[in-house]
């Protein structure tokens, strides 16, 4: 099976879209800074080189034979703090190439025709790179060429130090820009996070529109699309509920008439050969009427059919008393001991729905509890949460079937009763309407089943 890749976040995408441009901007910035600083640095060092040529020119004097002489050693000492890779040479020569002083084989820089008489060039001399400056003048009475040369190590170190400084400065600036961008992205994505929290906090039955105030224009189309989707889902659910309710209503009327006709027919044929068939038919009609009533209740119990305005505080002991009163005759007829253990407890809910919930739990308990058994209905508060439970000593529900019995029209493998398989489905739906939890447990006596509804705490 191929691994499922986690979905990419908007935060991560925005960050990836920013990193590449910021990196390119950093490279471009360093390149521009390098280009901007190289020319002034080279100009400064060329100016220093030209001053060396002028200093040598100032030491040229006419000799005894009339020829110019230079009051400098053949190889002047290196400048102060000179490094091992720094070298300096000079040459004073005539236009015909004769050397008056200095290094005879030192090349000349090509004449650039500049007004100040200086010309510069880069060349390789004695296997090293050099920067040359040649000064052409006739201040001594005859044309002379003063050439000075130095290795570019010092200027290269200066350029390197400035490059590093600019790189550090630009990197710090880019990091600060990235941090600011990350903070901005996080702040800009807060509306999406608020929308996500709103959706997560909404109860499952809530199909109302999401609020659109304070929603950024970029997120507004998404919220409006969600609202349209919620509206279509709500209309579909309501249509389905109306269909089920109408179908159940349409079934109830003819079934009631059919049941009345069967009762008349049973009286008219009392003691006749058709009595047994009429009784079977009468039982089938009763089951069909019960199923129709259960379908109607299930449609009305859908979570999306109820709003918060329908809820009110309900006393669970009072509810238990009413349901026991309505079920007592049936329990006595089945030889079942019906009791209650009520403690003060309140829940926030819809009264008729909770009445249906407890009525269905009671109906299931009576159906599955044999004669001589007992059923106990309890309510109270456990750790701050109200609860309601029906405990019977009946046949019980196998652990592997406890999840399935919540499904609609499912009947357990050992179920020999005449139910339609909707009772616990209705209980589960009503519990969801109230944000409660249905638990199917073993009976407290070691036999039967204990159905427990845990409600949220009442604020």
Image: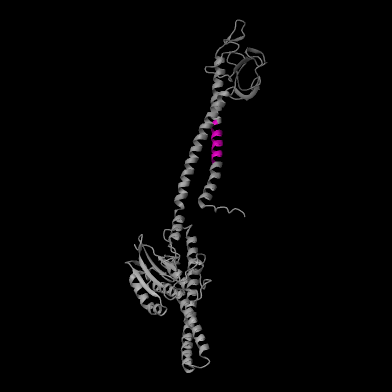
Image height of 140 relative to 160, above or below: above
In the depicted view, which residue is nearer to us: 169 or 310? 310
Asked if the stretch drawn in magenta spans residue 67, the answer is: no
Quadrant of the rendering where the N terminus is positioned = bottom right
Q: Is residue 405 visible to the viewer in this orientation of the structure?
A: yes
| Direction front: furthest residue | 372
Prevailing secondary structure class for the magenta stretch in the rendered image: helix
Residue positioned 47% across, 46% down in the render: 182
x%, y% of residue 193? 45, 55
- Residue 214 falls in image quadrant: bottom left
Tell me if 103 is positioned left or right of 244 in this view: right
For the magenta stretch, what is the residue range?
25-37
Q: How is the image coloured?
A: one colour
| Direction bottom: furthest residue | 268
x%, y% of residue 317? 33, 70
Image height of 395 relative to 160, above or below: below
Residue positioned 39% across, 78% down in the render: 332
Quadrant of the rendering where the C terminus is positioned = bottom left
Asked if the stretch drawn in magenta spans residue 26, the answer is: yes
In the depicted view, which residue is nearer to us: 248 or 364? 364
- Residue 148 falls in image quadrant: top right
| Direction right: furthest residue | 96
Q: Is residue 250 visible to the viewer in this orientation of the structure?
A: no
| Direction left: furthest residue | 344
Q: How many marks?
A: 0
x%, y% of residue 159? 55, 29
x%, y% of residue 24? 56, 42
Tell me if 446 is positioned left or right of 2 in this view: left
């Amino acid at each position: 099976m191929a691994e499922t890749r986690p979905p990419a976040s908007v935060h991560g995408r925005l960050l990836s879209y920013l990193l590449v441009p910021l990196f390119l901007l950093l490279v471009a910035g360093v390149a521009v800074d390098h280009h901007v600083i190289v020319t002034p640095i080279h100009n400064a060092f060329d100016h220093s080189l030209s001053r060396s040529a002028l200093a040598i020119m100032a030491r040229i004097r006419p000799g005894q034979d009339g020829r110019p002489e230079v009051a400098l050693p053949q190889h002047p000492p290196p400048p102060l703090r000179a490094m091992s890779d720094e070298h300096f040479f000079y040459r004073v020569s005539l236009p015909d190439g004769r050397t008056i002083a200095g290094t005879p084989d030192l090349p000349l820089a090509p004449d650039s025709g500049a007004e100040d008489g200086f010309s510069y060039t880069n060349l390789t001399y004695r296997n090293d790179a050099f920067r040359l400056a040649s000064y052409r003048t006739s201040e001594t009475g005859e044309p002379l060429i003063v050439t000075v040369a130095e290795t570019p190590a010092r200027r290269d170190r200066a350029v390197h130090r400035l490059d590093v400084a600019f790189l550090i400065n630009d990197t710090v600036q880019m990091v600060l820009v990235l941090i600011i961008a990350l903070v901005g992205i996080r702040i800009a994505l807060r509306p999406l996070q608020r929308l996500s929290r709103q959706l997560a906090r909404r109860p499952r039955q809530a199909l109302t529109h999401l609020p659109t105030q304070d929603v950024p224009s970029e997120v507004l189309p998404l919220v409006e699309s969600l609202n349209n989707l919620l509206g279509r889902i709500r209309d579909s659910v309501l249509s389905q509920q109306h269909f089920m309710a109408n179908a159940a209503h349409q079934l109830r009327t003819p079934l009631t008439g059919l049941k009345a006709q069967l009762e008349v027919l049973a009286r008219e044929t009392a003691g006749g050969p058709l009595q047994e068939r009429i009784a079977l038919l009468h039982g089938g009609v009763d089951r069909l009427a019960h199923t129709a009533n259960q379908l109607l209740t299930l449609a009305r119990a859908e979570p999306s059919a109820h709003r918060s305005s329908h809820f009110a505080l309900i006393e669970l002991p009072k509810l238990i008393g009413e349901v026991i009163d309505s079920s007592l005759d049936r329990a006595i007829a089945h030889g079942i001991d019906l009791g209650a253990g009520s403690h003060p407890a309140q829940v926030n809910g819809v009264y008729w729905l909770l009445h249906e919930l407890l009525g269905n739990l009671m109906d299931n308990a009576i159906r599955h509890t044999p004669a001589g058994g007992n059923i106990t209905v309890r309510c109270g508060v456990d750790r701050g949460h109200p609860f309601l439970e029906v405990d019977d000593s009946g046949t019980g529900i196998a652990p592997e079937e406890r999840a399935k019995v919540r499904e609609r029209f499912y009947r357990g493998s050992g179920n020999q009763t005449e139910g339609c398989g909707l009772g616990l489905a209705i209980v589960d739906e009503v519990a969801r309407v109230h944000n409660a939890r249905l638990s199917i447990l073993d009976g407290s006596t070691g036999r039967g089943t204990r159905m427990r509804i845990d409600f949220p705490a009442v604020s």
